[in-house]
Amino acid sequence: MATFRDYMSAFLYVLFPYNCLACGGVIEQGEETICSICRINFPRTNFHLDKENVLAQKFWGRTKIDYAISYVFFKKQNNVQSMLHYLKYKDAPEVGKLIGNWYGQELLENDFYKNFDIIIPVPLHPKKLRKRGYNQSACFGKGLAEVWEIPHLEHGLKKITNTKSQTKKSREERFNNMKKGFTVSNPEEIRGKSILLVDDVITTGATLEACANLLLESDAKTVSIATIAATQH
């Protein structure tokens, strides 16, 4: 039987319908943040089906990565870009967790998640974290961990230098700028573990490369990478 709260929720939805944070259209009552049409039509990478996918190849000769996967492809002015803009800049951490839940559920189908012991997000510098209020990569990691029921070490890595935007730097400049910018919080937590390192978007991979090398140097058994999105050229 419907309650008074149910009726009020339906009434408010009629007056103030919610908009999808990916396409901007009105979402149906009961949908969460992103409409079903966008969820169905997201440009999925299916990288988990091919261990030697183009994302994994990006790291060949740079660091030892077990798996490299992304949920969707990122292109300018598509619904993925809009969704990520809300996640990073519009105070919408729920987007990251929701995408983590969705991706995690899809990866349950072939037991892919059994390759990992713990999840660690790429960290934000404390100054940026205070300004934003949350780490968007950690939101994604929490969504995965919730579905897979494995530990999520939100502070497994720390950012110790506050690097500026690196979009105009070369790959070598990005890596040199990054490699001394992180530290492992507690090496005992990762020693001998198969780690899934998560981030929101991968472009050159310099940040993930630096973090992966640091985890491997700290005696992680394996390091794999998962991101919400990967750029498509």
Image: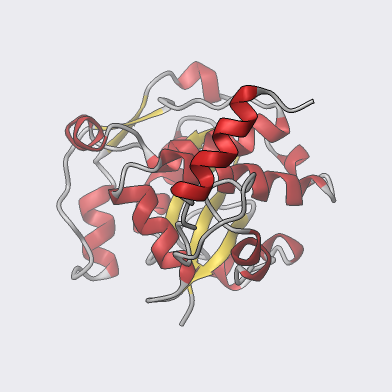
Q: Is residue 96 visible?
A: no
Query: Which is more toward the observer, 148 or 32?
Result: 32
Instruction: Please give left or right for residue 88 compared with residue 11 in the image.
Output: left
Task: Tell me, yes or no, if residue 29 can be seen here.
Answer: yes
The answer to whether residue 34 is left or right of residue 82 is right
Q: Nearer the viewer, residue 120 or 189?
A: 120
At horizontal 64% and vertical 54% (from top left) the residue drawn is: 67
Residue 90 in the image, given as x and y percentages of width and height: 30, 48
- Which residue sits at x=20%, y=52%? 177
Residue 116 as seen in the image, left or right of residue 61: right
* Residue 215 x %, y %: 47, 36
Eyeballing the image, is 210 above or below 114?
A: below
Q: Quadrant of residue 167?
A: bottom left
Q: Quadrant of residue 27?
A: bottom right
Question: Quick one: 123 or 40, which is closer to the camera?
Answer: 40
Q: Residue at x 47, y 69 (%)?
A: 79
Residue lying at the far bottom in this picture: please name it: 233
Q: Is residue 168 above or below residue 83?
A: below
Looking at the picture, how far across and down is residue 41, in whole percent?
A: 64, 71
